[in-house]
Image (cartoon, helix red, strand yellow):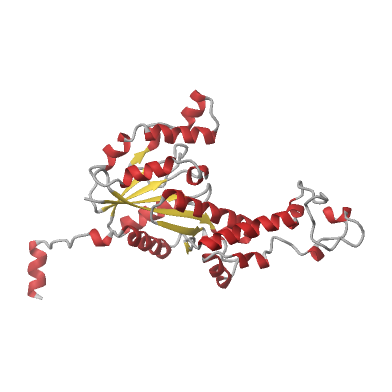
Amino acid sequence: MSKFGVMVMGPAGAGKSTFSSALITHLQLNRRSCFYVNLDPAAEHFDHAPDLDIKDLISLEDVMEEMGMGPNGGLVYCFEFLLDNLDFLSEALDGLTEEYLIIFDMPGQIELYTHIPILPTLCKFLSQPGALDIRLCAAYLLEATFVVDRAKFFSGTLSAMSAMMLLEVPHLNILSKMDLVKDQVRKRDIKRFLTPDASLLDDDPAVAPPTQIAPGDGPAAHLPKGKEDTDVDDGADGYADPSERRSVMRGTSFKRLNRAVAELIESFSMVNYLRLDSSDEDSVGAILSYIDDCIQYHEAQEPKEMKDDEFEEAAEE
Protein backbone atom coordinates (compact mmCIF):
# COMPACT_ATOMS: atom_id res chain seq x y z
CA MET A 1 0.00 0.00 0.00
CA SER A 2 1.52 3.30 -1.09
CA LYS A 3 1.96 6.28 1.18
CA PHE A 4 2.16 9.92 0.12
CA GLY A 5 4.65 12.60 1.02
CA VAL A 6 6.09 15.99 0.10
CA MET A 7 9.61 17.23 0.81
CA VAL A 8 9.54 20.97 1.51
CA MET A 9 12.97 22.34 0.67
CA GLY A 10 14.87 25.36 -0.59
CA PRO A 11 17.52 27.85 0.57
CA ALA A 12 17.58 29.30 4.07
CA GLY A 13 14.91 31.93 4.69
CA ALA A 14 12.67 30.79 1.84
CA GLY A 15 9.75 30.12 4.18
CA LYS A 16 9.82 26.31 4.32
CA SER A 17 8.68 25.97 7.93
CA THR A 18 6.06 28.69 7.47
CA PHE A 19 4.66 26.90 4.43
CA SER A 20 4.74 23.54 6.24
CA SER A 21 2.80 25.08 9.13
CA ALA A 22 0.26 26.67 6.77
CA LEU A 23 -0.11 23.38 4.90
CA ILE A 24 -0.76 21.46 8.12
CA THR A 25 -3.35 24.01 9.21
CA HIS A 26 -5.08 23.80 5.82
CA LEU A 27 -5.15 20.00 5.94
CA GLN A 28 -6.59 20.01 9.45
CA LEU A 29 -9.30 22.49 8.48
CA ASN A 30 -10.23 20.21 5.60
CA ARG A 31 -10.18 17.12 7.81
CA ARG A 32 -7.26 15.48 6.12
CA SER A 33 -4.67 13.51 8.03
CA CYS A 34 -1.03 14.56 7.97
CA PHE A 35 2.22 13.50 9.60
CA TYR A 36 4.83 16.20 10.18
CA VAL A 37 8.49 15.15 10.00
CA ASN A 38 11.17 17.69 10.91
CA LEU A 39 14.48 16.81 9.24
CA ASP A 40 16.25 20.05 10.18
CA PRO A 41 18.58 19.21 13.08
CA ALA A 42 18.99 22.92 13.89
CA ALA A 43 15.29 23.90 14.01
CA GLU A 44 14.00 24.97 17.41
CA HIS A 45 10.63 26.69 17.03
CA PHE A 46 7.53 25.14 15.46
CA ASP A 47 3.94 26.31 15.05
CA HIS A 48 2.93 22.64 15.01
CA ALA A 49 4.85 20.11 17.08
CA PRO A 50 6.56 17.56 14.78
CA ASP A 51 5.23 14.02 14.89
CA LEU A 52 8.79 12.90 14.22
CA ASP A 53 11.84 15.05 14.90
CA ILE A 54 15.38 14.27 13.74
CA LYS A 55 16.65 15.97 16.91
CA ASP A 56 15.38 12.94 18.83
CA LEU A 57 18.07 11.06 16.94
CA ILE A 58 20.79 13.69 16.51
CA SER A 59 21.02 17.48 16.77
CA LEU A 60 23.31 19.93 15.04
CA GLU A 61 24.21 21.59 18.33
CA ASP A 62 25.50 18.32 19.79
CA VAL A 63 27.50 17.53 16.65
CA MET A 64 29.15 20.96 16.60
CA GLU A 65 30.01 20.70 20.30
CA GLU A 66 31.23 17.11 20.38
CA MET A 67 32.79 16.82 16.91
CA GLY A 68 34.14 20.35 16.64
CA MET A 69 32.45 20.90 13.28
CA GLY A 70 30.98 24.03 11.75
CA PRO A 71 27.27 24.34 10.92
CA ASN A 72 27.54 23.14 7.31
CA GLY A 73 29.84 20.21 8.03
CA GLY A 74 27.77 19.34 11.08
CA LEU A 75 24.57 19.27 9.03
CA VAL A 76 26.12 16.89 6.49
CA TYR A 77 27.27 14.68 9.39
CA CYS A 78 23.72 14.65 10.81
CA PHE A 79 22.31 13.40 7.52
CA GLU A 80 25.04 10.80 7.13
CA PHE A 81 24.16 9.61 10.63
CA LEU A 82 20.49 9.50 9.63
CA LEU A 83 21.33 7.34 6.61
CA ASP A 84 23.11 4.93 8.96
CA ASN A 85 19.98 4.78 11.14
CA LEU A 86 17.12 4.70 8.65
CA ASP A 87 15.08 2.52 10.97
CA PHE A 88 14.42 5.78 12.84
CA LEU A 89 12.23 6.77 9.88
CA SER A 90 10.86 3.40 8.87
CA GLU A 91 9.61 2.49 12.35
CA ALA A 92 7.68 5.77 12.62
CA LEU A 93 6.30 5.85 9.07
CA ASP A 94 5.58 2.19 8.41
CA GLY A 95 2.23 2.18 10.21
CA LEU A 96 0.78 5.19 8.38
CA THR A 97 -2.09 4.59 5.98
CA GLU A 98 -2.62 6.06 2.53
CA GLU A 99 -4.91 8.71 3.98
CA TYR A 100 -1.96 10.57 5.44
CA LEU A 101 0.13 13.23 3.74
CA ILE A 102 3.66 13.03 5.15
CA ILE A 103 5.32 16.46 5.24
CA PHE A 104 9.12 16.43 5.38
CA ASP A 105 10.44 19.83 6.51
CA MET A 106 14.01 20.00 5.19
CA PRO A 107 16.98 22.19 6.22
CA GLY A 108 18.07 25.18 4.16
CA GLN A 109 21.73 24.38 3.43
CA ILE A 110 21.84 24.46 -0.35
CA GLU A 111 24.68 21.97 -0.76
CA LEU A 112 22.33 19.17 0.27
CA TYR A 113 20.27 19.77 -2.88
CA THR A 114 23.02 20.44 -5.38
CA HIS A 115 26.08 18.19 -5.26
CA ILE A 116 26.08 15.91 -2.19
CA PRO A 117 24.40 12.53 -2.89
CA ILE A 118 22.72 12.31 0.53
CA LEU A 119 19.18 13.36 -0.34
CA PRO A 120 18.98 11.16 -3.46
CA THR A 121 19.82 8.18 -1.23
CA LEU A 122 17.16 9.25 1.26
CA CYS A 123 14.56 9.72 -1.50
CA LYS A 124 15.26 6.26 -2.92
CA PHE A 125 14.85 4.72 0.54
CA LEU A 126 11.55 6.48 1.19
CA SER A 127 10.07 5.71 -2.22
CA GLN A 128 11.40 2.17 -2.62
CA PRO A 129 8.58 -0.25 -3.55
CA GLY A 130 8.06 -3.03 -1.06
CA ALA A 131 9.41 -0.97 1.84
CA LEU A 132 7.91 2.39 2.82
CA ASP A 133 6.77 2.93 -0.78
CA ILE A 134 6.09 6.66 -0.37
CA ARG A 135 5.02 8.55 -3.48
CA LEU A 136 7.23 11.59 -3.04
CA CYS A 137 6.96 15.09 -4.44
CA ALA A 138 9.57 17.81 -3.92
CA ALA A 139 8.40 21.37 -3.28
CA TYR A 140 11.34 23.72 -3.81
CA LEU A 141 10.73 27.21 -2.39
CA LEU A 142 12.50 30.33 -3.63
CA GLU A 143 11.83 33.69 -2.03
CA ALA A 144 9.83 35.96 -4.35
CA THR A 145 11.95 38.98 -3.39
CA PHE A 146 14.69 37.47 -5.56
CA VAL A 147 12.86 38.78 -8.63
CA VAL A 148 14.04 42.28 -7.74
CA ASP A 149 17.64 41.17 -8.33
CA ARG A 150 17.86 39.18 -11.58
CA ALA A 151 21.32 37.75 -10.81
CA LYS A 152 20.07 36.38 -7.49
CA PHE A 153 16.90 35.06 -9.15
CA PHE A 154 18.80 33.09 -11.79
CA SER A 155 21.23 31.80 -9.16
CA GLY A 156 18.29 30.48 -7.14
CA THR A 157 16.66 29.05 -10.26
CA LEU A 158 19.89 27.23 -11.14
CA SER A 159 19.88 25.68 -7.65
CA ALA A 160 16.26 24.62 -8.15
CA MET A 161 17.11 22.98 -11.48
CA SER A 162 20.10 21.25 -9.89
CA ALA A 163 17.83 19.82 -7.19
CA MET A 164 15.39 18.59 -9.84
CA MET A 165 18.12 16.72 -11.66
CA LEU A 166 19.74 15.36 -8.50
CA LEU A 167 16.63 14.03 -6.72
CA GLU A 168 14.74 12.64 -9.74
CA VAL A 169 11.31 12.88 -8.11
CA PRO A 170 8.21 14.84 -9.20
CA HIS A 171 9.08 18.45 -8.53
CA LEU A 172 7.29 21.75 -7.91
CA ASN A 173 9.12 25.07 -7.92
CA ILE A 174 7.42 27.76 -5.85
CA LEU A 175 7.96 31.51 -5.45
CA SER A 176 7.18 32.00 -1.77
CA LYS A 177 6.44 35.16 0.22
CA MET A 178 4.49 36.72 -2.62
CA ASP A 179 2.94 39.12 -0.12
CA LEU A 180 6.33 40.85 0.20
CA VAL A 181 6.51 41.89 -3.45
CA LYS A 182 2.92 42.96 -4.06
CA ASP A 183 3.86 46.63 -3.72
CA GLN A 184 7.22 46.31 -5.50
CA VAL A 185 6.46 44.34 -8.66
CA ARG A 186 3.35 44.47 -10.84
CA LYS A 187 1.40 41.26 -11.42
CA ARG A 188 2.09 41.54 -15.13
CA ASP A 189 5.83 41.62 -14.46
CA ILE A 190 5.67 38.74 -11.97
CA LYS A 191 4.24 36.49 -14.69
CA ARG A 192 7.47 36.87 -16.67
CA PHE A 193 9.38 35.16 -13.86
CA LEU A 194 7.13 32.11 -13.71
CA THR A 195 8.88 30.71 -16.79
CA PRO A 196 12.46 32.06 -16.57
CA ASP A 197 14.29 33.01 -19.76
CA ALA A 198 17.30 35.10 -20.68
CA SER A 199 15.20 38.09 -21.79
CA LEU A 200 14.70 38.97 -18.10
CA LEU A 201 18.28 40.26 -18.09
CA ASP A 202 17.54 42.85 -20.78
CA ASP A 203 15.80 45.20 -18.34
CA ASP A 204 17.52 44.33 -15.06
CA PRO A 205 16.96 47.30 -12.69
CA ALA A 206 19.94 46.23 -10.57
CA VAL A 207 22.32 47.04 -13.43
CA ALA A 208 22.14 50.81 -13.61
CA PRO A 209 22.96 52.42 -16.93
CA PRO A 210 26.31 54.25 -16.86
CA THR A 211 24.58 57.62 -17.28
CA GLN A 212 22.85 57.16 -13.90
CA ILE A 213 26.14 56.99 -12.00
CA ALA A 214 27.41 60.28 -10.70
CA PRO A 215 30.63 61.61 -12.23
CA GLY A 216 33.66 60.66 -10.19
CA ASP A 217 31.80 57.77 -8.53
CA GLY A 218 32.95 54.16 -8.87
CA PRO A 219 35.62 52.67 -11.12
CA ALA A 220 34.70 54.85 -14.10
CA ALA A 221 36.45 57.73 -12.37
CA HIS A 222 39.75 55.96 -12.97
CA LEU A 223 39.18 55.26 -16.65
CA PRO A 224 41.01 57.18 -19.36
CA LYS A 225 39.21 60.31 -20.49
CA GLY A 226 36.47 59.52 -23.01
CA LYS A 227 35.73 56.04 -21.61
CA GLU A 228 33.70 57.04 -18.57
CA ASP A 229 30.34 56.27 -20.18
CA THR A 230 31.24 52.81 -21.44
CA ASP A 231 30.63 49.57 -19.59
CA VAL A 232 33.36 48.78 -17.13
CA ASP A 233 35.68 46.14 -18.49
CA ASP A 234 36.82 43.92 -15.64
CA GLY A 235 39.10 41.89 -17.86
CA ALA A 236 42.78 42.35 -18.57
CA ASP A 237 42.75 46.12 -17.98
CA GLY A 238 41.51 45.55 -14.42
CA TYR A 239 39.54 48.77 -14.11
CA ALA A 240 36.69 47.21 -12.08
CA ASP A 241 37.09 47.27 -8.32
CA PRO A 242 35.69 43.97 -6.97
CA SER A 243 35.14 45.55 -3.55
CA GLU A 244 32.45 47.83 -4.99
CA ARG A 245 29.17 46.04 -5.67
CA ARG A 246 28.06 48.52 -8.32
CA SER A 247 31.36 48.03 -10.09
CA VAL A 248 30.94 44.26 -10.14
CA MET A 249 27.30 44.50 -11.25
CA ARG A 250 28.34 46.62 -14.23
CA GLY A 251 31.31 44.44 -15.13
CA THR A 252 31.19 42.72 -18.49
CA SER A 253 32.33 39.39 -17.04
CA PHE A 254 29.47 39.45 -14.54
CA LYS A 255 26.99 40.20 -17.31
CA ARG A 256 28.35 37.37 -19.44
CA LEU A 257 28.15 34.97 -16.50
CA ASN A 258 24.52 35.88 -15.79
CA ARG A 259 23.67 35.58 -19.47
CA ALA A 260 25.29 32.14 -19.66
CA VAL A 261 23.41 30.92 -16.58
CA ALA A 262 20.10 32.30 -17.87
CA GLU A 263 20.58 30.71 -21.30
CA LEU A 264 21.50 27.38 -19.69
CA ILE A 265 18.28 27.43 -17.65
CA GLU A 266 16.27 28.42 -20.72
CA SER A 267 17.84 25.67 -22.84
CA PHE A 268 16.84 22.96 -20.35
CA SER A 269 13.34 24.46 -20.05
CA MET A 270 12.68 22.52 -16.84
CA VAL A 271 11.86 25.22 -14.30
CA ASN A 272 8.44 26.81 -13.95
CA TYR A 273 7.21 28.54 -10.82
CA LEU A 274 3.98 28.59 -8.87
CA ARG A 275 3.09 31.54 -6.64
CA LEU A 276 2.62 31.15 -2.89
CA ASP A 277 1.41 33.42 -0.13
CA SER A 278 1.45 31.29 3.02
CA SER A 279 -0.87 33.75 4.77
CA ASP A 280 -3.57 33.16 2.13
CA GLU A 281 -5.49 29.91 2.62
CA ASP A 282 -6.58 29.82 -1.04
CA SER A 283 -2.97 30.10 -2.14
CA VAL A 284 -1.92 27.25 0.15
CA GLY A 285 -4.87 25.18 -1.11
CA ALA A 286 -3.82 25.77 -4.70
CA ILE A 287 -0.28 24.53 -3.99
CA LEU A 288 -1.73 21.49 -2.21
CA SER A 289 -3.78 20.67 -5.32
CA TYR A 290 -0.57 20.60 -7.37
CA ILE A 291 1.09 18.39 -4.77
CA ASP A 292 -1.87 15.98 -4.82
CA ASP A 293 -1.70 15.89 -8.61
CA CYS A 294 2.04 15.08 -8.59
CA ILE A 295 1.72 12.22 -6.13
CA GLN A 296 -1.68 11.08 -7.51
CA TYR A 297 -3.16 11.25 -4.05
CA HIS A 298 -6.85 11.24 -4.97
CA GLU A 299 -6.48 8.42 -7.49
CA ALA A 300 -5.45 6.09 -4.67
CA GLN A 301 -8.36 7.01 -2.38
CA GLU A 302 -11.24 4.60 -2.20
CA PRO A 303 -14.84 5.84 -1.79
CA LYS A 304 -15.76 5.93 1.87
CA GLU A 305 -18.69 3.74 2.79
CA MET A 306 -21.65 5.53 4.30
CA LYS A 307 -22.81 4.67 7.80
CA ASP A 308 -26.14 2.86 8.05
CA ASP A 309 -28.05 5.92 9.29
CA GLU A 310 -26.56 8.11 6.54
CA PHE A 311 -27.48 5.50 3.93
CA GLU A 312 -31.07 5.37 5.15
CA GLU A 313 -31.39 9.17 5.09
CA ALA A 314 -30.05 9.29 1.52
CA ALA A 315 -32.49 6.56 0.45
CA GLU A 316 -35.44 8.43 1.92
CA GLU A 317 -34.51 11.57 0.02
Q: Is residue 62 above or below residue 211?
A: above
In-front residue for pair 186/159 = 159
Where residue 257 appears, as percent x and y from the top left, is 66, 55
Q: Quadrant of residue 170?
A: bottom left
Residue at the limit of the structure toward the bottom, as seen here: 317
Q: Residue at x 59, y 54 (%)?
A: 155
Q: Is residue 305 above or below residue 1?
A: below
Q: Residue at x 38, y 35 (%)?
A: 83
Where residue 200 appears, as percent x and y from the top left, is 62, 66
Q: Residue at x 81, y 61 (%)?
A: 213
Q: Is residue 286 above or below residue 164?
A: below
Q: Quadrant of the C terminus?
A: bottom left
Tell me: 182 left or right of 317: right
Q: Is residue 227 above or below residue 77?
A: below
In-front residue for pair 51/75 = 75
Tell me: 151 left or right of 306: right
In-front residue for pair 93/171 = 171
Where residue 171 appears, as percent x and y from the top left, is 41, 56
Where residue 8 appears, as percent x and y from the top left, is 42, 50
- Residue 172: in sight, yes or no? yes
- Residue 49: in sight, yes or no? no
Tell me: 271 left or right of 310: right
Residue at the limit of the structure toward the top, as seen here: 66
Q: How many badges with numbers are in the image?
A: 0
